[in-house]
Image: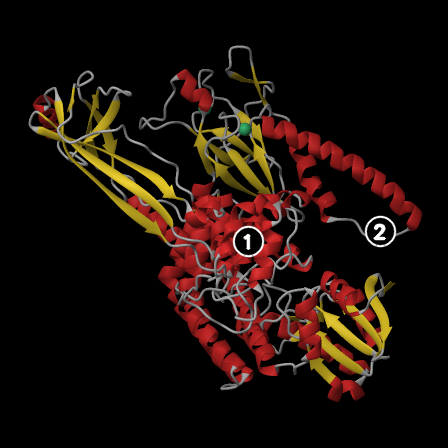
Amino acid sequence: MRLIVTEKNNSARRIAEILGNGAKESASYKVPYYTWSDADGDHMAIGLKGHVLNPSFPDGYSNWQKTDLHELIDAKLVKEPTDKNVLRALRKMAKDADSVVIATDFDREGELIGLEALSEVLEVNPEVESKVKRARYSALTRDEIERAFANLDQLSYELAYAGEARQDIDLIWGATLTRAVSLATRRFGSNFLSVGRVQSPTLGLIVERELERRAHKPQPYWEVLARFQHPDDAFEAHHAVDKFWKREEADAAVAGTKSPGVVSAITSRKVNRRPPTPFNTTAFAAEASSRLSITPSRAMRAAEDLYMDGFISYPRTDNTVYPSSLATRELVASLVRIPEFEAAAPLLDGKLKPTRGKKETTDHPPIYPTQAVNPGGLDGVHRRVYELVVRRFLATFGKPMITESTRAEIEAGSETYFVRGSVVVEPGYAAIYTYARSADDEIPRLEEGQSLELDGEPWIVDKETQPPSRIGQGKLLEMMEERGLGTKATRPDIIQKLFDRGYVFGNPPSPTETGIAMYEAFKRYVPRMATPEMTAELERDMDEIAGGKTKKDEVLEISRQMLHGTYEEVADKEEDLAKVIWAGMDEDRILGPCIVCERAGRKHDDGSPNMLRIIRARKSGKRFVGCQGWEADNPDACDVTFPLPQRGEVFKLEDRCSICGETPRLKVVPFRGRPWNLCLNEECPSMEEMRKRRAEREAARAAKEDSEKIDGDGASGDGAKADGAKVDSAGTKTRARRSANGRRSRSGKSRSRSRS
Ligand SMILES: [Zn+2]
Ligand SMILES: [Zn+2]
């Protein structure tokens, strides 16, 4: 029997469908597998759940306070199963195998997953060792799978070891420094502060930009505009001086403007925009983020699903050049038969010549649709992502988009004004890649020498210079790629982790004060972890291992030595480092201005608004939100309070909720289970919805518990535990209620509370 091992169940099923007409589905230890027979004999395909083994520290290192970190660094790592049922099923099948095909994804990670699975197989069936082959495919399509199984290859141990080295180094560095920093700041248990080899420099990119924004001093400037009459319609023109840095000069420009204006020059030029290059992972995720507002990690998950369904090619790729073997004409022909994409039909009239990007690799093709499906049949995010991939693919064969921009100058008295417009003359590729099509901005028909009466007086607009904008998630992915931070596979997850740990919030992400402090502390005391250099170096080592030029153990040893030194540095400056981080956490307790004080005209002593902040009551130890404007024994002072869940971490999401506009909005990260958003205003529509969803979940859970009692399987999801923390929040009953006049008054009478 030939055993085929894939990375996920979906790919095992697809391969069974393609290779074994009428394959039979069964399950072992609840893990599905597929069997069929043909002229070559019996076959069996089983899908793993990604990694079946993960490196971890051996027993005896789990106590954070008692473990010497130098010993932790040198501890010999062990492999732990990630899913026991998958391993049991795999071992059971391996016993009957007389040959094995590793058919995991075709990349470093896939090679490692294949090696892990193989080590399990060989433990129960060592004889099969000489009969192991590797199937490498880039799409779950019939052509590609048949080709891969007709040309079986060998497993690349080097590639697998490179993946393994990264895994080990990430674990050792992450665990050691996370423990070191958490211990230094006395953050134990689930309150720990996570540090990561790639995560920390990525946080640095976001923090550096934020610091630039904060350092920005807005400069005032003035713009001058005038309105001219025109037979079609009056229109606005801008003074030829873009920005007046002195108000007097703007005033002089207004005074010098006299009616009528005369059109003195008209210039127009055509601009060609070249069609986009084929999608690699980074460009794909960046476009999904900027054009569709889908976060990189969500876009990647959707792309993986579409790949598993056989709709698009493997989405983790650096390649931006289609291989010549790609049957582009057939593919385009099948795509344009779908009404959504018929705008690309004219492509078939000529020769199909795609654009090429800068990177050309041979492992995977760029991301392209492998099957024409009607996007209407897919659900929301999958539909939008599939459409993006199809439109991009078709666009790479398109003609340039041609726009014509026109600028007219108008002399009025001593001053010159201009109007500018831009019109798409030839949409080219933008007819199908609709995201790229610019809106027409037409100007009235003008002729040189034409006289135009002023329509009223010119006017001045006050403006000020803006700080550099925040880095969107798509752009962040590109910056990580440029700096060699993470891999195409890990980048979206690393960004997500920054959100989960409360180091950044919002979209585009901005850092919390804790996030800023973490980065600043590292930059000052452990520069090696704050900068991308070390990571880039490691990436080069990985490539050397993959290329067989160096050994995994050597790379690990050097990395461990480096970490001993880095940890020494942290230990030496532990107290200073903790102070920086504590100061940041303190800042994060300030949530946003109090709207009640704002409406009552109450301010802080220094004239700044009274802020709402997280306070811990000295007697009960309970935390809640109170206003800075509160004063003991002053009945006129602000006595607004809001309850908080007592367990889990809370982070500020918004100074003021973008949904109700009343109070700050927080993110609550429970010890277990999913983070959720909390608007302090209990009448906020977002909370309304949450209460509804919670009630639904509770009803569903009650139903589930009933059914579990019957079949005796006690596995309960994390969602159940997440709610535990929420129930707590309702227990602290000092809710502010809004009275008829829109002010808040407190229902509880107790005023005994202390400031932290
Ligand atoms: Zn207040
Ligand atoms: Zn709200």
Image vertical order of residue 152 relative to residue 696, above or below: below
Q: Quick check: can you spot residue 693?
A: yes
Q: Residues within 10 Å of mark 1 (few under 14, many from 20)?
A: many
| Residue under numbered circle 2 | 714
Q: What element does badge 2 sit on?
A: loop
| Residue under numbered circle 1 | 389
Which quadrant of the picture is home to ligand 2?
top right
Q: What element does badge 1 sit on?
A: helix
Q: Residue at x 47, y 39 (%)?
A: 589
Q: Position of residue 543 (x, y in %)?
A: 49, 78
Q: Amino acid at mark 2?
A: Gly
Q: Residue at x 34, y 38 (%)?
A: 423
How much space separates mark 2 and mark 1, taking CA atoms? 42 Å
Q: Residues within 10 Å of mark 2 (few under 14, many from 20)?
A: few
Q: Foreground: 531 or 750?
A: 531
Q: Foreground: 81 or 264?
A: 264
Q: Position of residue 620 (x, y in %)?
A: 61, 35
